[in-house]
Amino acid sequence: MKILIVGSGGREHAIAWKIAQSPKAEKIYCAPGNGGIAEYAECVDIGAMEFEKLAAFAKEKEIDLTVVGMDDPLVGGIVDVFEKEGLRVFGPRKNAAILEGSKAFSKDLMKKYGIPTAAYENFTSPEKALEYLETAKMPIVLKADGLALGKGVLICNTLEEAKAGVKTLMLDKQFGSAGDEIVIEEFMTGREVSVLSFVDGDTIRIMTSAQDHKRAKDGDQGLNTGGMGTFSPSPFYTKEVDDFCKEHIYQKTVDAMKAEGRPFKGVIFFGLMLTADGPKVLEYNARFGDPEAQVVLPRMKNDIIDVFEACVDGTLDQIQLEFEDNAAVCVVLASDGYPEHYEKGFEITGFDAFAGKDDYFVFHAGTKRDGQGRILTNGGRVLGVTAKGKDLKEARKKAYEATEWISFANKYMRHDIGKAIDEA
């Protein structure tokens, strides 16, 4: 088969790596790709939002299956464009990707179908939002309704912070039109867990659990980022939690989307909070998490092309997902200053150290090749250094060991990824 991957980050590198292991994968393309993806795929200079160009390329190259990794093209309707052209594509249509594209939609869906989540209100008027805050209990959470690169969530400890947050999102438009509508919801406490799943419109198959670290600095300090590291499985995702979520969250979400005339095919990412009152949904994403994919896919035993095709064809009920009985930890190497201001264009060295080591991986997020055989930094999150071990403690030790093999100017990372493991 000829496969096209749409995207350019660490998630897409992990997907490309996994697809390359399938005997069915004859040729892989990636648009636009990055310096690491080029090892497995031919990178094509077409942007992820250039739907017509991508569809034309897929027809010209007789692509058998396109896999869309990123949220923006999914929410923008790339799947609809491809399907209209008679092309096979893995991912939700535009009317289903709204599950991630609109926080207000997803909160209303959960309320309507009795899926546990935090109490909330939606606002399109800054004045009404400020009025509501005067009587609200602190701390409180403000969320931009639309896509904001995983950064449009503000946790406000005081009324003053919350008012400033409304100004940031709705008046200053820090995240553009994503802040035209905001969700104000109660602050939940507990452990956060990420659970990825494959869905074919009717059937849902749960992948292994993971846990992300969103804040830029150690001790969960600093600004929200796209993710500074992750581990899998989560020791806090117990059988009891799994049973509850299977009964009250997972299938109910799939059935709710179908009942709304928005059947979902692709990956649903469940962001869960394990509260004292039981698990509740923090958020939905309509694709693999980044960097969750970097720890989940290396542990997955299935041929991923079989699973993608089952989702497209509606035959996921015939697939049983299998994962290795081990653990994985990913530490993100970023450019110092991320997520605000940082320099790029520095040479990265040390990749040779990963050669021939089965339990170590380095997934490229923001890199590019310079035409002289060098790989340069080209983003805020640069690499995801991942290691597998017999348990989380061993995987964590190995992942941090491997971060020392890589060198580039202004290299930055958190040193406490997976520290919660010690408390489990």
Image (cartoon, rainbow, N blue to C red):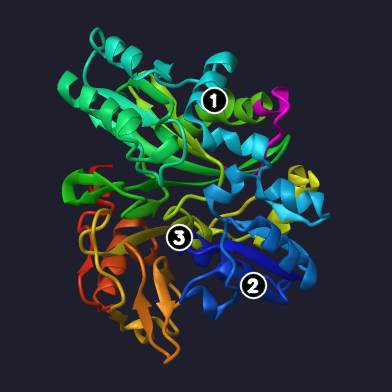
Q: Residue at x 56, y 33 (%)?
A: 99
Marks 2 and 1, the one that precedes in the sequence: 2
3 vs 2, front mark: 2
Marks 3 and 2, the one that precedes in the sequence: 2
Q: From the top left corner, tell me how far across and down residue 63 is, in percent.
A: 76, 67
Q: Which residue is mark 2?
A: 29
Q: From the top left corner, tell me how far across and down residue 272 is, in percent.
A: 43, 33
| Residue 241 drawn above or below residue 227 | above
Q: Residue at x 49, y 59 (%)?
A: 11
| Amino acid residing under circle 2 | Tyr
Placement of the N terminus among the 4 image quadrants: bottom right
Horizontal side, residue 124 vs residue 332: left or right: right
Q: Residue furthest top?
A: 135
Task: Say whether residue 267 is visible.
Answer: no
Q: Determine whether label 3 and label 2 are within 8 Å by CB.
A: no
The verdict on residue 263 being magenta is yes
**Badge 3 element:** helix
Q: Which residue is mark 3?
A: 294
